[in-house]
Image (cartoon, rainbow, N blue to C red):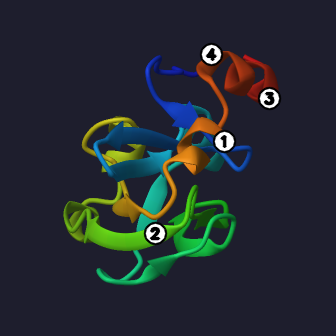
Amino acid sequence: MSRIDEGIRYTESHEWVKKNGDEYTMGITDHAQHEMGEIVMVELPAQGAQAVRGEALGAIEAVKTAEDFYAPLDGKVVKVNGELDGNPGLVNEDPYGEGWLAVIKGADPAQYDELLSPDQYRALAGE
């Protein structure tokens, strides 16, 4: 069974989002990294890139698959996790911590409230 952290929000496309003021740290969920298997490469967005909710922001490549990850809300990418360049497996090891992907400065705080609660995500992921 995958870990689902309380106190953060989720998307239907298996990203998680943690709010810190007007900045939102995001990554892929434990469920998503389990489904993908061993992650071998992460393609991050450029710092300063525009994030548009629901649009591809980057990609994750695993041994058996490659998937885009999507912006959970509108805003601007203000930080990316450069540690993943040399160690993409951090996403497998610690998806809610050291394996984060990007930080977005949000344009509309109401979009965060529209994301899935832990219980809603648990139901979606069949956990």
Is residue 18 depicted above or below 127 in this figure?
below
Q: Residue at x 59, y 37 (%)?
A: 113
Question: Could you tell me the amino acid type at mark 1?
Answer: Glu
Q: Name the residue under label 2.
A: 75
Q: Mark 1 points at which residue?
A: 35
User: Viewer-proximal residue, 63 or 84?
Assistant: 84
- The residue mark sitting in front, 2 or 1, is 2
Q: Residues within 10 Å of mark 1 (few under 14, many from 20)?
A: few
User: Viewer-proximal residue, 16 or 106?
Assistant: 106
Is 83 left, or right, of 100 in this rendering?
left
Q: Which residue is drawn at 34% across and 59% down?
A: 88
Callouts 4 and 2 close, C-beta under 8 Å = no
Callouts 4 and 1 close, C-beta under 8 Å = no
Image location of residue 54, percent across then percent down: 69, 65
User: Viewer-proximal residue, 89 or 83?
Assistant: 83
Q: Name the residue under label 3.
A: 124
